[in-house]
C-alpha cells in the first residue's frame, strides 16, 4: 500500500509558526463524526465503570434513612 501525500495548507503567523490548518469540508465532517463517536464511546465507558462502583440497595436505603432522621 502506497502512502498518499495530500497538499497541506497551513495558516502561519508573522513569525512563520503554523497556527491553523485548512481542510476540505468532507475531511472536516469526517473528523467531526469520528470525534462525536469517540465522545459516545467515552461516555459509555464512564457509565460502565460506575456500575462497578454500585452501592447495594440495602446499604443505600440505610444511608437514606440516616439522612432523614
Image (cartoon, rainbow, N blue to C red):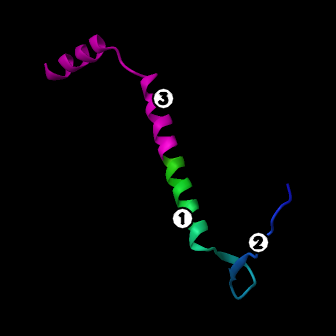
Q: Which mark is residue 53?
A: none
Which secondary structure class fits the magenta region best?
helix
> What residue span does the magenta drawing correspond to?
40-69
Pair 2/3: label in front: 2
Residue 16, above or below 68: below
Asked where in the image residue 51 lies, by quadrant, the reply is: top left
Give the percent coordinates (x, y) of residue 19: 66, 76
Residue drawn at the location 68% of the way across and 84% of the way down: 13
Horizontal side of 61 relative to 50 (left or right) equals left
Q: Give the alpha-carbon distance from disc 2 to disc 1, as whole Å.
A: 17 Å
Give the percent coordinates (x, y) of residue 67: 19, 22
Which comes sooner in the sequence, label 2 or label 3?
2
The C terminus, quarter of image: top left
Give the percent coordinates (x, y) of residue 6: 76, 71
Residue 14, above or below 62: below
Residue to which mark 1 is pinned: 29
Which comes sooner in the sequence, label 2 or label 1?
2
Q: Which mark is residue 6?
A: 2
Q: Give the alpha-carbon distance from disc 2 to disc 3, as whole Å.
A: 40 Å
Mark 2–mark 1 contact, CB under 8 Å? no
Q: Give the alpha-carbon distance from disc 3 to disc 1, as whole Å.
A: 30 Å
Q: Nearer the viewer, residue 4 or 51?
A: 4
Residue drawn at the location 63% of the way across and 73% of the way down: 23
Amino acid at each position: 500500500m502506497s502512502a498518499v501525500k495530500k497538499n497541506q495548507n497551513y495558516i502561519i503567523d508573522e513569525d512563520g509558526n503554523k497556527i491553523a490548518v485548512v481542510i476540505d469540508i468532507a475531511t472536516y465532517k469526517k473528523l467531526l463524526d469520528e470525534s462525536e463517536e469517540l465522545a459516545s464511546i467515552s461516555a459509555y465507558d464512564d457509565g460502565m465503570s460506575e456500575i462497578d462502583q454500585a452501592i447495594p440497595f440495602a446499604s443505600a436505603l440505610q444511608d437514606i434513612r440516616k439522612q432523614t432522621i
